Image (cartoon, rainbow, N blue to C red):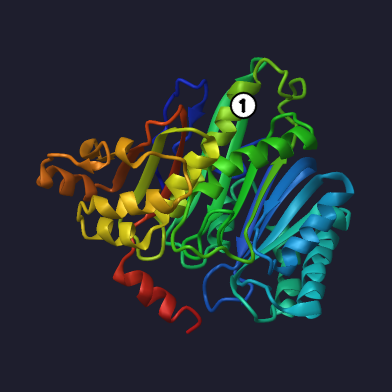
Amino acid sequence: METIQLTESRETTAGFTTVSEPRITSPLGFTAAGMHAGIKRKRKDLGLIRCEVPAAAAAVYTMNAFQAAPLTVTREGMAVESRMQALLVNSGNANACTGDEGLADAYRMRKAAAHALDVPEHLIGVASTGVIGERLPIGKIIGAVPGLASSLAVVGHEDFCRSILTTDTGIKAAEVRLHVEGREVRISGVAKGSGMVHPNMATMLAFMTTDAVIEPAPLHGLLREVTDESYNMITVDGDSSTNDMVTAMASGLAGHRPLTENHPDWAAFREAFAFVSRELAKMIARDGEGATRLVEVRVTGATTLEGARQAAKAVVGSSLVKTAVYGADPNWGRILCAVGYSGAQLDPAGVTVELGGVTVVEGGRPAIFDEGAARRALEQPTVEIGVHLHEGVEQACAWGCDLTYDYVRINASYRT
């Protein structure tokens, strides 16, 4: 199983460098591990990230009313001092809709990790992903934690990444490096997610680490901002999960002055942090269950940012658009339909639509275009759909995937 790559290692104009072999343990102070604890039949299913110091931390959670027990436990711990020293994650079982017993199991996971690592319980985050409504095999998990903790290592990246996957076809990881006050700062992230993915979080978990010096309050503000333009702008199938969570941990070991919005290097750090988040979000969308193509919808010329986001998410989330992409059918009427019901302010007579640079709609009416060129645009690994509303200056981008026969096959037998 390989890492899903969208960006090659390169220097960027934004002042950071992307890394071709990302590791969640690359920032100073972090180790990780992953193992098979017996939750799933054969594959790794229990993972751990540890920071050598209590890290400044931030987290965002799913908007689903049925929030899984691990989210409750993690949120409670974060409320103590907004710091985290370790994250214990299991896959194969979501520990969602499991009542008081499930909540007690999440606390037991936290306690086991705290004991094995000799850190206070509130500094341990927990997360779960998998089948909803089944109790965790908590005895297996607790029995495995000591061995998991003893195997923590800087080289534990791949084992951890494998341990959090469910129907994912590959590891999702990204890393960038930049300089703050002349000191190298690293930002890394890993994620899982393939189905039950929709804006306002998805069936996804994402974990970010950095050695930047930043206090919890600005880190939390940054994570919330970036989530709205990355993880909350993806969809696979329109379902928002019970277990979604994104966390960020900052060890502070890079040694520069604390980052705030007033720091001269804040803009560069923000863009680097956002880049990692966008890359992970796009990897999740590209790896949608049964997907063959990544779909990128960019809406420009909107009167408000929210309107641009509404329109982009409506198009990328439309089942009719998604099936048209799968069939490489330039059926632009489906795109206009989605824009029309999105709620974005627009004049139908002013809308332009492009498929990979081929203008198919101009002024709200069909343009004269090369059908073959439009089809070829829809056959690319990344399908680019552009919508210009010609109403204002705001823009937004959303990501999704095509909808295939395999999506039905995978989800029809998910539990069996």
Question: Considering the image in quadrants, where does the N terminus appear?
Answer: bottom left
What's the residue at 70%, 30% (across, down)? Answer: 212
Q: Residue at x 52, y 70 (%)?
A: 43
Is residue 404 found left or right of 228 in the rendered image? left
Give the camera-side residue of 28 and 236: 236
* Viewer-proximal residue among 274 and 163: 274
Task: Sort mark 1 into few (<14), some (14-19) or many (20+) by Cα contacts within 10 Å.
Answer: many
Residue drawn at point x = 67 percent, y = 15 percent: 264
The three-letter amino acid code for the residue at tag 1 is Phe
Where 73 sits versus 416, above or below?
Answer: above
Rendered image quadrant of residue 324 = bottom left
- SS state under label 1: helix
Q: Is residue 130 left or right of residue 214?
A: left
Instruction: Name the spot of residue 82 as percent of width and height, x first.
Output: 82, 44
Question: Could one spot residue 22 in this view of the protein?
Answer: no
Residue farthest toward the bottom in the current orientation of the protein: 416
Count of labels in the image: 1
Could one spot residue 285 in this view of the protein? yes
Q: Quick check: 238 left or right of 183?
A: left
Residue 183: where, in percent of width, then height? 65, 19
Residue 288's spot in the image, x, y percent?
Answer: 41, 60
Identify whether 248 is placed above or below 28: below
Q: In the figure, residue 8 lies in which quadrant?
A: top left
Location of residue 100 in the rendering, given as x and y in whole percent from the top left corner = 81, 78
Picture quarter containing residue 28? Answer: top right
The residue singled out by tag 1 in the image is 269
